[in-house]
C-alpha cells in the first residue's frame, strides 16, 4: 500500500503580501512531499484564532513571509508566538527590500 504522506507547512503572511504568498504556495505545492497550510485572511472569516492555532498545531514546519507589511502585523506576530510556544521549527523568508532599508 502506498501512503500519501505530506509534510504540512504553515505559511504566515500579511494580507498585503498575497502575491508573495501565491508564489510561495505554488513552489511548495510543486514539491510532492509538502503541503502548504494557509490560514484564511483575517478580514474574511470568523473564528480566525481557532483556525490559525489548529493550522499551526497540525503543521510540522512554520514559515513566515517577513516584509514591511508583516513586520508589525499583529496576526503574524501572534502566529510566530504560537509556533514558538509549540516548539515548531520557524523559518523566515525576508523581503530583500526590508534588508536594504533597515
Image: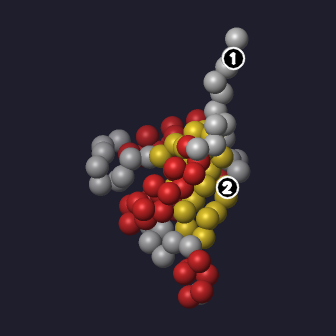
* Residue sitting at the far front: 30
Sort mark 2 into few (<14), some (14-19) or many (20+) by Cα contacts within 10 Å: some
Tag on residue 97?
A: none
- Can you say whether 56 is above or below 23 in the image? above
Sort mark 1 into few (<14), some (14-19) or many (20+) by Cα contacts within 10 Å: few
Secondary element at image label 1: loop
Q: Is residue 34 left or right of residue 53?
A: right
Query: What percent of the width, then of the height, locates residue 66?
Result: 55, 68
Tell which of 58 and 7 is nearer to you: 7
Residue at 58% in and 35% down = 58
Residue at 42% in and 62% down = 19
**Quadrant for the N terminus in the image:** top right
Give the residue at mark 2.
Answer: 90
> Which of the 4 image quarters holds residue 73?
bottom left
* Residue sitting at the far top: 1
Give the residue at mark 1.
Answer: 2
- Can you say whether 3 is above or below 9 in the image? above
Secondary element at image label 2: strand
Tell which of 23 and 96 is nearer to you: 23
Depth check, mark 2 against mark 1: the one in front is 1
Q: Distance between the residues labelled 2 and 1?
A: 30 Å
Query: What percent of the width, then of the height, locates residue 50?
Result: 43, 40
Residue at 35% in and 53% down = 42
Look at the image and tell me whether residue 66 can be seen.
yes
**Quadrant for the C terminus in the image:** bottom right
Residue at 56% in and 73% down = 95
Amino acid at each position: 500500500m502506498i501512503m500519501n504522506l505530506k509534510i504540512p507547512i504553515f505559511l504566515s503572511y500579511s494580507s498585503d503580501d498575497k502575491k508573495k504568498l501565491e508564489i510561495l504556495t505554488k513552489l511548495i505545492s510543486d514539491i510532492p512531499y509538502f503541503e502548504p497550510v494557509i490560514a484564511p485572511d483575517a478580514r474574511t472569516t470568523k473564528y480566525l484564532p481557532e483556525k490559525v492555532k489548529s493550522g499551526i498545531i497540525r503543521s510540522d514546519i512554520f514559515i513566515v513571509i517577513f516584509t514591511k507589511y508583516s513586520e508589525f502585523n499583529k496576526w503574524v506576530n501572534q502566529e510566530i508566538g504560537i509556533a514558538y510556544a509549540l516548539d515548531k521549527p520557524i523559518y523566515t523568508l525576508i523581503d530583500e527590500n526590508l534588508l536594504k532599508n533597515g
